[in-house]
Image (cartoon, helix red, strand yellow):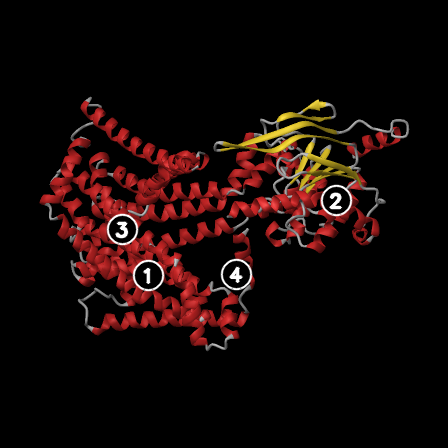
Amino acid sequence: MASLLRSDRFLPAATGIASLAAAVAIVELLLRAEILNPHIMPYPSDVFAAIPRIIREEAVFQRFLVTAGETLASLVLIVAIGVPLGVLLQRNPLVRKATESWFSALAAAPIVLAYPLFLVLFGRNASAIVALAVIGSIPPVVLKTVDGLAATRKVLINVGRAYSMTRRQIFWRIMVPSAIPSIFVGIRLGLIFALVKIVGVEFLINFGGLGQLINELAERYDLAGTYAAIIFVIAVSMLAFTLTEWIEKWLTQR
Amino acid sequence: MAYAKIGVEARSGLLATDRAKVMAIRIAIIVVMLALWEGASHSGLFFKDVIPSIATLAAALVRLLSGSPFYANLLVTAGEIAAAMAIGSVFGIAVGLLLGANPFLARTYEPYIYYFGPTPKIIFFSVLIMLYGVGPGSKIAMGAISCFFPIALSTLAGMREINPVLIRVGKSFSARPRHMVFKILMPAMRVPMITGIRLGLGVAIIGTLLAETKLSNKGLGYMVIQSYNRFDMPTMYALIIVVVSIAVLLNVLIERWSRSNSSDNLGSLA
Amino acid sequence: MKVAASMNRIDVNEVSKPEPDPVLVVERVSMKFNLGEQSVTAVDDVSFSVRPGEVFTVIGPSGCGKSTLFNIIGGLLGHYEGEVRIDGSKIAGSHESIGMVFQEESTFPWRNVIDNVAFPLELKGMGKSERLDRARHFIDMVGLSGFERHMPAQLSGGMRQRVAIARTLAYEPRILLMDEPFAALDEQTKLLLGEKVMEIQQRLKQTTLLITHNLSEAVQLSDRILIMTYRPGRVKRILDIKLDRPRTADVVGSEAFGRYVAEIWADLREEATRGMSDAESARR
């Protein structure tokens, strides 16, 4: 039974990696056979060779720190603004009814298109990027905080009443703890929203961390380097995404 | 089922007096924000036109909407987004159906789509320019890559959400494959599929517009970056207001559509 | 009703022929499942036949292979040993003669009541006005007139199950095959809906095969009850229920009813005990 379960996981993972490798090999072959144009598409082997090169020569570590710092600053602001806003909305049902749909609309709005505006308001620096990331990423935190608090099971609140807890005690001792998983889902969504915007705007305005790296290499027409940088940035984003998922699992399992 | 219930509650949940209060709160918030805005614009704390007065903004909006360049560029952008959605949804739905129908393929490839989905796609744009040129091609590709992921993931989720007993009901009535697909599978997946289209359209709009701001000579994104270069802040605000309004409106319309019940419409024809 | 008419003819013949030709024959049916290296026999050498117009019930504890049997007869499961025959001819795959009612929620949430009930007629290609008329007839039969335009989400669980039953009746099957159709309902609703189904069954002389684990439900509804053993599922005994028809839900109060329940429980107790100790040891 145990061996069966393991092969159940192993086979798909192996097939996935194998098909990825096969795709890379096919591209390499098509390039060597000159069916694909090597001036547009670099040899995969060159791309892999370029990964250590860009890490060595392009100050990747500092860039990573810049992007990570912007992300962290955004995260702090998102939580500091989003969670209290969510609490406020939940405690004032009429305000919630009035503005909840606005927050969902804001979540769907292409705020990032306003990046030139933020450049004018804040100057071409990290604060513009952080401000944009924060505004665009607060809605999920607000909405999920409201959801989480509102979804506290009625019976738990009645338990609190039965022990004659005050409203304040019920809120802090019962509603907040039971809402934490949902609030964290919101924070994770906000973090992903923010990270995507930060890297994107870095790329667009050619400023700062990892996003800029890709833009610079592309402007130098370093084809293999550009692809390598894209792979690197995607890997970092996926890693950050996985990490938040682990933290969420860890938090919700307790 | 759940969505139908939500609809019923939303319709009957609010008392008339509450509704008036909600309206009052909304109006109050809007008025306060507009006042703050107007105050900031006259405060002298910002460069001229960085926070334009409401009158200036309104004038810019009217100017924008009454001139022909806006509509020409809107048409270009809308065309790019439509093409991107067509390509992205064909691939997204195909991949979603394939993975939904085959658990082995799902276990093999779903993690890639799932973890790749939330990464910033705009960084592919430099490569897409090399592949598809500086014209609409690279913007369409950008939008298509963006919307592929949410559409594929929603289709897959939709396949999984289908209540298996409904498939058995179909079989028990000896339904032909065509009937299975059109009368059971498709309607059962309607809501998640529309959600996928809605999310996909949202990111396709962002991807296409951002690509236009980076490198292009047409489209609304190009207009935004032009107004930035001319330091024509009122026009830039007007453009952003219009684009955000269109995106939010489309989002709301699609959501309404997914909540409306197809059977009600069919029934009223009878 | 075509089916009802032919049924009446057989009833007349019954005087001269004590044993009418069975509608459904299940002969030496076995089914094995492979779980990894283990193979589990779910159904083992089960044979029985169902006479026209009767309510035949298969009862057994959870895990006795009742649902497997349901799926085999309904044609949703292949690769079994033995034969299932309807009116003398062997069947494979889903069959027009069998209408199934499932234990799970099975109405289409995107169709209103009348379109749900008209669904099988729509598949047959019946014209719109004709199929809506027929659907209305069966909606009326299950007592849901006035709810034609309601969506399933607006109905109670018992009403939804009535929609599902009406939908299957609209298919006009030779045999109505029901798997725990009242399992999701509360006790009172269960009794009243059982009464309703029996009233319809009597009216249509609908041959019915019911699968259940519920003792009183089985006695309330059935003409004959087949008791199955727990793992592997075999035939333990077939019992005639000689309670008067038409039966109402009040039958559950009668002395005879209590005797039948006690008699079946005596047989089932041993099987259920084995099933329970298996389930407990699986958790250890």
Q: CA gap, disc 4 to disc 3? A: 38 Å
Residue sitting at x 21%, y 65%: B49
Q: Earlier in the sequence, mark 1 or mark 3?
A: 1
Q: Type of residue at label 3?
A: Ala
**Residue mark closest to the camera, 2 vs 1:** 2
Helix, strand or loop at label 4? It is: helix
Q: Chain under label 3? A: A
Q: Residue A199 or B71: which is nearer the viewer?
A: A199
Determine the image quadrant of residue B121: top left
**Residue mark closest to the camera, 2 vs 3:** 2
Can residue C127 be seen in this snapshot? yes
Helix, strand or loop at label 1? It is: helix
**Residue mark closest to the camera, 4 vs 3:** 3
**Residue mark closest to the camera, 2 vs 4:** 2
Q: Mark 3 points at which residue?
A: A240
Q: Chain under label 1? A: A
Q: In this view, does C145 lie above or below C98?
A: below
Q: Type of residue at label 4?
A: Ala
Residue sitting at x 15%, y 51%: A63
Determine the image quadrant of residue C50: top right
Q: Mark 4 points at which residue?
A: B10
- List x then y, in percent, for residue A122: 19, 62
**Residue mark closest to the camera, 1 vs 3:** 3
Q: CA gap, disc 2 to disc 3? A: 62 Å
Q: Mark 4, residues whose alpha carbon is within 10 Å: few (<14), some, or many (≥20)?
A: few
Q: Do marks 1 and 3 both belong to one polypeptide chain?
A: yes
Q: Mark 2 points at which residue?
A: C264
- List x then y, in percent, for residue A101: 42, 61
Q: Mark 1 points at which residue?
A: A138
- List x then y, in percent, for residue C121: 66, 35
